[in-house]
Image (cartoon, rainbow, N blue to C red):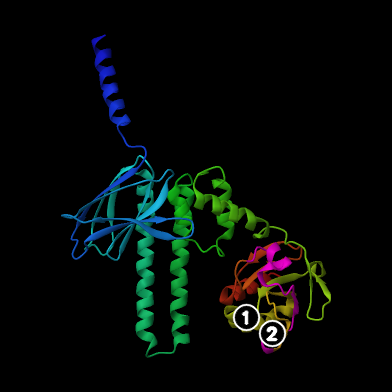
Amino acid sequence: MKNYIVSTSILAVLLGLYSCKDEKSFKIEGNISNTADVKKVYLLRADTNQVSVIDSSELKDGKFEFKNQSTVANLFKLRLGQSLFDLIAKNGDDIKFETNLADEKHEYKVSGSQESDKIKEFNTFSNVYSAKNSQLVNEFQSKVKDNNQDSLLKIYQPVFEKNMDAYSQEVLKFVNDNKKSLAAFYAAMSLDPNKYEQQLVAYADDLKDEFKDNAPVQQFVKQMEAVKPVSVGHKAPEFTAKDVNGKDVKLADYKGKYVMIDFWASWCGPCRQENPNVVKLYNQYKGKGFNILGVSLDENKQAWQRAIQDDKLTWQQVSDLKKWDGQVARAYQIQAIPSNFILDTEGNIIAKNITGQNLERFLNKTFAKL
């Protein structure tokens, strides 16, 4: 009976301590070494469309404290001078943070928030690749003054792309290993949405019943639900549009053929830069069964026709002449151009948004099998 009373008393104390915890706010206490000339710490909140400063704290003997509110777990950043550190916080969290500003690797310690520990894990390998790419950029810029830029790009761009591919694979593994973590969501947002759309669509399916009170997560899920019908592996939506002479052209006319639906516009600089590559590849593979159907997001018919002639686009062209509000652009969820969809002979989307050397490699691989 005595032991029961003692145990009950301990439980009461523990419950009492827990009940004293402030569930209406979160707290961050920091201890910073080698602050140099940094006098203030800024707390930033990452909302759906922006990152903004929401509070600041004076550094006193290397220490600072924040008390703020977030009813749901959200991404926050601490800015100390030029350095940024990620945390995930929600009401009730009591977070302890430590770092040394003299550390070039920007390593830090965090406790009191399991999600913050996970985002730190992501940042650890993210910073490695960021440092590699920064070094590449610095090397490129130091050499470009004395060398031809195009020749240097041929050297440095493949290395940069290789780094980004390796980074992306680590992100995908991290996301797959931590699907129930909000940190995985923020990591996934660093992926190229064009290159990894299939993986992001699948990840959105996993998230649809999670984090229902988190606006950025729910916006992402909604976006991926809209994109899913026009992602790789799905049947391309049928459409009919007018050519330069006002005649109807149907996607169904290309049934049984490989076709690339190429979204572009005369006013789109990147589109016009990519056009010579598309012309070259079309001429190279049209004899093997490769077709292109251009869909322009122009509004001015004369500008559209002039660009077709100037860029020597000899394949079929159509346009609603309604820019982003055209029927075809809306059906294919076009948010940016250039954009393309490659369909197989059954009308299935087998590739999407590939340009430059990636498009050349894809066509070479595809038509080598035929």
359 to 197, vertically: above or below: below
Q: Residue at x 59, y 74 (%)?
A: 355
Quadrant for residue 268, please give it.
bottom right
Q: CA distance from mark 2 to mark 1?
A: 8 Å
Q: Position of residue 368 (x, y in %)?
A: 67, 72
Could you tell me if residue 65 is visible in this image?
Answer: yes
Magenta includes 331? yes
So how many labels did they put on this image? 2
Magenta includes 296? no
320 to 65, vertically: above or below: below
Q: Residue at x 41, y 60 (%)?
A: 51
Q: Which mark is residue 303?
A: 2
| Residue occupied by mark 1 | 267
Q: Residue at x 69, y 80 (%)?
A: 282
Left or right: 206, with 4 as reference point: right
Give amino acid for label 1. Answer: Trp
Callout 2 environment at 10 Å: few (<14), some (14 to 19), or many (20+)?
A: few
Left or right: 262, with 73 as reference point: right
- The magenta stretch is 310-334
Give amino acid for label 2. Answer: Ala
- Out of 96 and 322, give the one closest to the viewer: 322
Q: Position of residue 288 (x, y in %)?
A: 73, 77
Q: Quadrant of the C terminus?
A: bottom right
Q: Residue at x 29, y 22 (%)?
A: 12
Q: Are marks 2 and 1 in contact (CB under 8 Å)?
A: yes
Secondary element at tag 2: helix
